[in-house]
Structure formats: C-alpha cells, structure tokens
Image: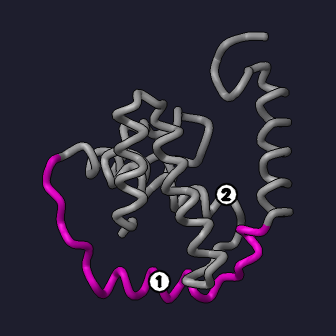
Amino acid sequence: MPEKKTIERARKDAREGKAPSTQAGEFVGEEMDHIRQGKHGARSPEQAIAIGLSKARRAGVKLPPPKQGRVSKQTRAKAERDYSKGQSGKRSQPASKRSRSRTAALKREGGAAASHSALSRHARSAARARKSRGTVGGSNRQR
C-alpha cells in the first residue's frame, strides 16, 4: 500500500497537468526509498521500478500497460490487471496472507538494486536502448 504522502504528491502532479509517467515517478521513488531503508529488497533496478509502476497503476494513475513486444506477456497481463483495478472506482483490501508472503519474499532480496551505481547503470542502458530504436525520450518521434 503506498504512503498517503506519495498519493498526495501524485495527485498534485495530475492536477498540474503533468504526464502519467511523472505521476508514477512518485511511486517509483517511494519504492527506492523503501529498499534503501531496508523495508525490503529487489533483485534489480528494473524490478524495483516495476513494483513502483504497479503501485501507481493500482492507485489510479492513468499509466497504460506497455505495448505488446516490449515486455513479456505475463508482465503485460499484470500491468493490464493493475491498470483496470486502479481505474475501477472500488478499492478492496489485499489478502493479508498474500501481502505477508509477498513482503517476506522481497525481504529475502538484497538492497543493492536501489544503489546510486545500479540506478545510473540502468539509466544509461535504457538511454542506449532508446537510441538504438531511433526514438527520443522514449516517444515514437523520429530524430
């Protein structure tokens, strides 16, 4: 469950007309903070980002699932579920057993995924991948 401050910051971004990815960035940042504080870990920066995006979608950020071919079918299906869950008005409490097991699994992971060097490495490789696709800033606009 995201913290109230994070949801408030994301809603403020939405009111200001900022992009959904900017709103979702609040949740990703919160996830990085949780890993740094030792609340839980992640195997890679990508996993930490994915957890943050999932929380954002469930909180109602209008961040559509990734296009087909960009990620695995399972990841896309999970993103679609999260998105529809967030867009439907009703909020349900997650199963406590599932929450505990999820937290326990994440606690077994390391904290290096949120380190400065790991995030820097991820940013560089993501930029390199965008450059090879011939897109600017992740959009489909040609250079």
* Color encoding of the figure: one colour
Label 2 Cα neighbours within 10 Å, binned few <14 / some 14-19 / many ≥20: some
Placement of the C terminus among the 4 image quadrants: top right
Q: Position of residue 87 (x, y in %)?
A: 25, 43
Does 44 sit left or right of 16 as displayed? right
Query: Label 1's element?
Result: helix
132 vs 21, nearest the viewer: 21
Please name the residue shown 34% across and 81% down the image.
98
Say whether residue 122 is left or right of residue 106.
Answer: right
Q: Residue at x 85, y 44 (%)?
A: 124
Query: Residue 85: x percent and y percent?
Result: 26, 51
Question: What residue lies at 60% left-to-right and 35% top-to-bottom?
Answer: 69
Residue 52 locus on image (x, y percent): 51, 58
Given residues 74 and 22, the one toward you in this image is: 22
Element type at mark 2: helix
For marks 1 and 2 on the same chain, the one whose residue lies earlier in the sequence:
2
The residue identified by callout 2 is 46
Q: Is residue 82 left or right of residue 43?
A: left
Mark 1 belongs to which amino acid? Thr
Return the residue at label 1.
103
When asked about the image quadrant of residue 62, the answer is top left
Q: Is residue 42 above or below residue 5?
A: below
At x 80%, y 36%, the residue is 127
The type of residue carrying mark 2 is Glu
Please state the extent of the stretch shown in magenta in the rendering.
89-115
Q: Please state the horizontal and vertical placement of residue 5, each as a whole percent of the image.
A: 39, 61
